[in-house]
């Protein structure tokens, strides 16, 4: 507990959304042990915007799954706020996912039988905080991502970009420590990609922490910081020098 | 800790709304799945209703004999004086002396009714259009109507004065009255017994009465519809103890004093004991007597109750098998559904669903399916009596001969919905849902969320 308290503050008083130390993940197969992560350490200050890059098989998804509390590390520690996730039970991890983590997937991953608002509400349902005000909150989020007039639509009635915007609204509904995006723009055309990236930028400007996996340099260029993995280790961890940003007008024009 | 939250989620309307939503996504599949439970529940209710109907029918027929009675019937032993060549005929059956003996020696007895039945041809000479009718001439006493549950429609039953005075009066059954007196009031008219050249004045007409059941080999079914009741004293005086039937040009002569005595026991509790005493009295000194049969309706009722329980268990077994088949159908579909919805399970897990939430979700869907099937089954089950009536009337009108050849036990049977079968069927359908839903739900919950998310 005291360690955790110490680690959540670094000089200058910037709060940490997450902090990982010497994280390893081994997959034990019949014939061999795959060492997907071999000791990864970094801090995620609040309102950071990180792009995780690296060649295929370098451990990006594995790392993101650990950050998203979908899995537990083999060794190492992972602090979310004050809690050490590495030692949590399955149910406790579920509760953290429901209450403090936002996922945006490459394949959108909306639930087909639910409407737009209902999809946005799902994480609240699993925290047991679903009530009248949560419907209002979901509607507000749908409006924020430009889908105010689609509240009752089903996912199949929406375009890819619209579905991804629903997913972003859903990732925000529980006021997460950070948004985890695994190739969130991988299925989208360039215009829609810009639309989503503009939205990420706006959210980040408002103070949201975003961690996204991507293999496209143009996408990564919108982040503030890049972490490059190779063979399960951090090869590069540096700020992005010539960061690409959208102007306020551009952001507005993307949000019809 | 999560048991409590899972239970509270179980009772949240939203949980069920969600389950139903997933089900209407595949209406055809859900419908087919529901069918299994539907038929199971319908069969539970129908089988129980038909079983109850049959057993009530049997029970009613036995009760018509009177649970408080012990009946002694005379039986003509095979080859005892049946030959036409001998002039002297051996007498068989229960005798008047034995009746007296029972009446005076057994303390638990109320009344003892002597009855003597012979086949006769009845005619009414006042109307040339009235054809003679073959029926039963029954010699009896004034208590007969009450003990045999015969009810007077018009006039009155025989009186003790008429019995003691051997009067030539009679009471006739409803059907006989209709046949002999199609257009006249039978009261006060004379019935003519051709064989004996005797007239009897009609003092009463009875209400129609159903035939009584045949009980094993000992008591033939009794048809009361063409009966003429006269005082037994009158019968003895005018006709003696011989009965002569002409058939195929030869005589069959029978000699017997009484056809039956009906012994009314004062307390129902004493029936079995009294029956033993009656048997001991009648068989004293002639242990293997073949010319009487002692029928105890009370014991038959007990047997019928046992038969009913066996029948119910058997029917229940059949219904259970059909519910089992329905349940396996549900489980099969749910396993397929779980596989098909692997991705959804992964998404829900990633968004914070605990294993118990996933178990609950699929359990709720299975229970919804089985309860919908159960409720539909109950509704259709309640139509059973109506459907059986319809079936009977259709059979009766389209194939009357076949219908007439069916045993009365079937045609008279009216299904009776057993009240407990409704909650029973409902509970069974819920139980089937839980039982057959647990495994698919468990499978869904055990999935690794990361793998599930990768599933195509
Ligand atoms: N569930 C698993 N079982 C076994 N090996 C795995 C599993 N998941 C990932 N790996 C292995 O771990 C390594 C890192 O994978 P991953 O994190 O998916 O890489 P990336 O997302 O960067 O392509 C790869 O060699 C991959 O084969
Ligand atoms: Mg990957």
Image (cartoon, grey):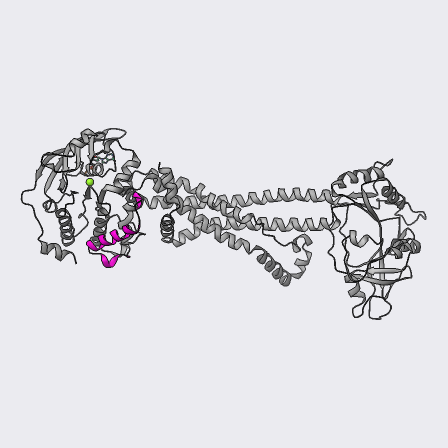
Is residue B365 rendered to the left or right of residue A50?
A: right
Residue B319 shown in magenta = no
Residue A151 shown in magenta = yes
Instruction: Where is residue B215? Give x, y as percent.
Output: 74, 47
Instruction: Where is residue A122? Give x, y as percent.
Output: 29, 47
Is residue B74 rendered to the left or right of residue A189?
A: right
Of A11 and A169, the residue lying toward us: A11
Instruction: Where is residue B56? Give x, y as percent.
Output: 66, 50
Residue that extends furthest to the left in the rendered view of this protein: A242
Q: Is residue B426 above or below residue B191?
A: above
Q: How many marks?
A: 0
Q: Which residues are magenta?
A: A125-152
- Ligand 2, by image quadrant, is top left
Q: Quadrant of the C terminus of chain B?
A: top left
Is residue B108 rendered to the left or right of residue B412?
A: right
Image-quadrant location for residue B453: top left
Is residue B242 rendered to the left or right of residue B341?
A: right
């Amino acid at each position: 507990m005291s360690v955790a308290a110490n680690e959540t503050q670094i000089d200058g008083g910037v709060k940490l959304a997450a902090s990982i130390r010497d994280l390893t993940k081994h997959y034990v197969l019949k014939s061999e042990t795959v060492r997907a992560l071999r000791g990864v350490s970094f801090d995620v200050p609040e309102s950071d915007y990180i792009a995780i890059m690296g060649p295929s098989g370098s451990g990006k998804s594995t790392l993101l799954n650990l950050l998203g509390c979908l899995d537990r590390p083999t060794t190492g520690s992972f602090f979310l706020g004050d809690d050490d996730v590495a030692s949590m039970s399955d149910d406790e991890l579920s509760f953290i996912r429901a209450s403090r983590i936002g996922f945006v997937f490459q394949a959108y991953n909306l639930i087909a039988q639910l409407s737009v608002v209902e999809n946005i509400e799902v994480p609240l349902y699993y925290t047991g905080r679903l009530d009248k005000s949560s419907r209002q909150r979901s509607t507000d989020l749908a409006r924020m991502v430009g889908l105010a007039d689609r509240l009752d639509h089903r996912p199949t009635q929406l375009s890819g970009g619209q579905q991804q915007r629903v997913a972003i609204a859903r990732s925000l509904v529980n006021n997460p420590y950070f948004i985890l995006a695994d190739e969130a723009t991988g299925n989208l055309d360039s215009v829609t990609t810009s639309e989503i990236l503009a939205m990420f930028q706006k959210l980040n400007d408002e103070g949201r922490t975003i961690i996204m996996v991507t293999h496209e340099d143009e996408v990564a260029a919108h982040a503030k910081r890049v972490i490059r993995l190779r063979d399960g280790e951090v090869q590069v961890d540096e700020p992005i020098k010539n960061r690409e940003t959208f102007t306020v007008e551009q952001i507005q024009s993307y949000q019809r | 800790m999560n048991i409590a939250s899972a239970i509270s989620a179980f009772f949240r309307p939203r949980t069920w709304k969600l389950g139903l939503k997933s089900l209407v996504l595949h209406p055809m599949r859900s419908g087919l799945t529901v069918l299994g439970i539907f038929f199971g529940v319908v069969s539970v209710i129908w089988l129980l209703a038909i079983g109850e109907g049959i057993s009530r029918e049997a029970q009613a027929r036995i009760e018509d004999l009177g649970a408080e009675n012990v009946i002694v019937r005379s039986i003509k032993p095979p080859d005892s004086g049946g030959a036409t060549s001998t002039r002297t005929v051996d007498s068989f059956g229960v005798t008047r002396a034995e009746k007296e003996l029972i009446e005076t020696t057994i303390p638990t007895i109320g009344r003892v009714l002597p009855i003597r039945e012979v086949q006769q041809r009845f005619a009414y000479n006042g109307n040339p259009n009235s054809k003679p009718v073959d029926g039963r001439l029954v010699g009896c006493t004034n208590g007969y109507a009450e003990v045999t549950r015969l009810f007077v429609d018009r006039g009155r039953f025989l009186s003790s004065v008429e019995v003691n005075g051997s009067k030539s009066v009679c009471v006739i059954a409803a059907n006989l009255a209709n046949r002999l007196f199609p257009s006249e009031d039978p009261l006060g008219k004379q019935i003519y017994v051709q064989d004996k050249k005797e007239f009897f004045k009609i003092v009463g007409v009875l209400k129609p009465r159903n035939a009584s059941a045949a009980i094993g080999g000992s008591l033939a079914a009794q048809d009361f519809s063409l009966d003429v009741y006269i005082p037994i004293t009158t019968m003895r005086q005018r006709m003696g103890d011989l009965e002569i039937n002409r058939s195929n040009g030869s005589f069959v002569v029978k000699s017997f004093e009484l056809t039956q005595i009906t012994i009314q026991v004062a307390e129902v509790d004493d029936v079995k004991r009294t029956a033993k005493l009656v048997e001991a009295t009648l068989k004293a000194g002639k242990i293997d007597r073949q010319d009487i049969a002692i029928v105890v309706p009370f014991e038959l009722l007990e047997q019928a109750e046992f038969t009913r329980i066996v029948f119910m268990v058997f029917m229940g077994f059949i219904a259970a098998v059909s519910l089992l088949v329905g349940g396996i159908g549900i489980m099969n579909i749910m396993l397929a559904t779980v596989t098909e919805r692997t991705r959804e399970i992964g998404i829900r897990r990633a968004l914070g669903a605990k294993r118990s939430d996933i178990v609950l979700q699929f359990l709720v869907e299975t229970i919804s399916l089985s309860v919908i099937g159960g409720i539909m089954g109950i509704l259709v089950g309640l139509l059973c009596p109506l459907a059986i009536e319809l079936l009977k009337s259709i059979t009766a009108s389209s194939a009357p001969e076949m219908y007439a050849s069916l045993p009365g036990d079937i045609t008279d049977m009216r299904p009776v919905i057993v009240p407990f079968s409704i909650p029973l069927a409902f509970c069974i359908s819920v139980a089937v849902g839980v039982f057959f839903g647990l495994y698919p739900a468990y499978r869904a919950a055990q999935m690794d969320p990361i793998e599930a998310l990768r599933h195509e």
